Amino acid sequence: MKTTSKILKIINILFLILTLIFLIVQWNQIPMQIPTHYDLYGTMDNYGQKNSLIGFFIIELVIYLLLKSIQWIVKLAINSSDTKKSFKQYISFIAESFIFVSNFSFSMLIYHMATSSNISFWLTFGPLVLAILIICFTFYKFETC
């Protein structure tokens, strides 16, 4: 569990870096008007300026920092209490998993907005399903320990 959390931490940072690199490298190829909203079926239904991609990246970065802050505060609270080591590892895994889901969602959204392509159903609801599965799996594993 500890190794998985470390791998997720590295992947989370890579998502941020790769999204930023994508925006920098592709900036001149991105059209001036991009989709800024998708309907439930992943079809573009609202458009805006390409500068909004910078805003979406900033939102991704802020959410990443907020989730890392929450993770740090929870770790402090857990470390000050007398809890099992396995519980601490599961909490860390859940936190890194949610950060991964958030980063993945925003990175894919930014990519699809920049390329003006439709988003698939699974890209829309996949992160939510993944988050629910992570929670269920983690609590199941914790209860069986």
Image (spheres, rainbow, N blue to C red):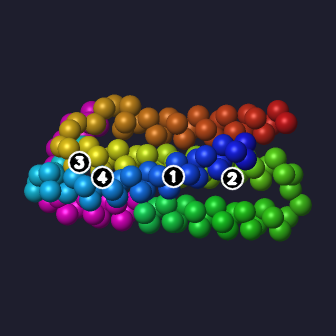
User: SS for tag 4?
Assistant: helix
Up/down of 100 relative to 16, above or below: above
* Mark toward the start of the polypeptide (3 vs 4): 4
- Residue under numbered circle 3: 113
* Image location of residue 84, percent across then percent down: 86, 51
* Mark toward the start of the polypeptide (2 vs 3): 2
Q: Which of the two discs, 1 and 4, sits closer to the camera?
A: 4
Q: Would you call the spot at circle 1 few (<14 residues within 10 Å), some (14-19), or many (20 or more)?
A: many
Q: Would you call the spot at circle 3 few (<14 residues within 10 Å), some (14-19), or many (20 or more)?
A: many
Residue closest to the far right: 82
* Mark toward the start of the polypeptide (2 vs 4): 4
Task: Specify the amino acid type for callout 2.
Answer: Ser
- Residue under numbered circle 1: 12
112 with respect to 116 (left or right): right
Tell me how far mark 3 sits from mark 4, CA to CA: 12 Å
Range of magenta residues: 39-60
Tell me how far mark 1 sits from mark 2, CA to CA: 14 Å
Q: Would you call the spot at circle 2 few (<14 residues within 10 Å), some (14-19), or many (20 or more)?
A: many
* Image location of residue 78, percent across then percent down: 78, 62
Task: Specify the amino acid type for callout 1.
Answer: Asn
Tell me how far mark 2 sits from mark 4, CA to CA: 29 Å
- Residue under numbered circle 4: 22
User: SS for tag 3?
Assistant: helix
Task: Specify the amino acid type for callout 3.
Answer: Met
Tell me how far mark 1 sits from mark 3, CA to CA: 20 Å
Residue at left offset 61%, top offset 46%: 7
- Residue under numbered circle 2: 92
55 with respect to 27 (left or right): right
Q: Are marks 2 and 4 in contact (CB under 8 Å)?
A: no
Q: Nearer the viewer, residue 74 or 57?
A: 57
User: SS for tag 2?
Assistant: helix
